[in-house]
Amino acid sequence: MERGSDRHSCRHRGRPHVEKQESARTPRVPHAAWRESPSLRAKRSSRLATVTIITPFLDDDPRAWQCLRRYATELAERFPEGYDEATLTRPEELDGALLLACERDRPAGCGVWVRLSPGIAEIRHLWTDTTARGLGLGRRLLDQLETDAAAHGVRTLRLGTHSSLDEAIALYRSSGYREIDPYNTSPYNQLCFEKRL
């Protein structure tokens, strides 16, 4: 039943319709969090503890390119227009750093920061494997990318993302990135963000 018809029927029966208001003291918690048991939370935390983030990453390690190709494959499946692997930043070509997350030596995620100009850099290819999602690894990688870039004189980070990547957009906004006008011509950067470090 539509809400409008429900309101009408309440009024029709002589009872005023009252919108349910959330208490300001009660934070909104996603339904999944209510269902998560303490044992599941502990399991996620222990898995995250086994993940090692390697930085700076050596570009001659084949795991770097393997991780980037898995990232490209997933985007090709998720984007309506597909994804051209040729647009990837190759580890040996970047002016910045590639961070690789490994769970028991298996690549579980990656991220890149690339210098654009003095004091300004871009985050690219932030990705976590489907088996590692929900662990907080994406946020951990993003934090480490920010720390590493700042240590190399970067004061402003930019990034672009596709409008279909809701989880990435939520991560960036909750991490202090604000939306800006497009700063490059990539067709995949439909939303652009910036953060001052």
Image: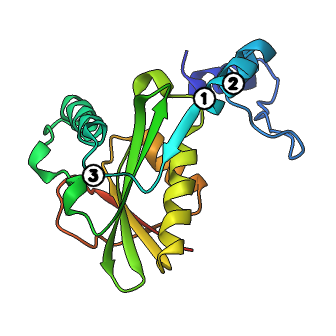
Q: Nearer the viewer, mark 2 or mark 1?
A: 1
Answer left or right for 117 relative to 139. Answer: left
Residue pictured at 38% horizontal, 52% vertical: 57
Q: Which image quarter holds the N terminus?
A: top right
Name the spot of residue 152 as percent of width and height, x first. 47, 75
Task: Name the residue that disc number 3 marks.
Answer: 59
Measured from the top left, where is residue 151 in percent x and y?
A: 53, 73
Distance CA(mark 2)–CA(mark 3): 29 Å
| Residue 105 vs residue 119, the one in the foreground | 105
Q: Quadrant of residue 37?
A: top right
Up-down: is 62 above or below 93? Answer: above
Name the residue at the right extreme. Answer: 25
Q: Do labels 2 and 1 touch, CB within 8 Å?
A: yes
**Mark 2 closeness class: few <14, some 14–19, many ≥20 residues within 10 Å:** few
Q: Is residue 168 visible?
A: yes
State the mark number for residue 50.
1
- Using a 10 Å C-alpha cutoff, classify the residue at mark 1 as few (fewer than 14 neighbours), some (14 to 19) or many (20 or more): few
Specify the amino acid type for callout 1.
Thr
At label 3, the amino acid type is Asp
- Label 2 belongs to which residue? 46
| Residue at the bottom extreme, as displayed | 118
Locate residue 14, reporting x and y percent.
81, 22
Q: Secondary structure at mark 3?
A: loop
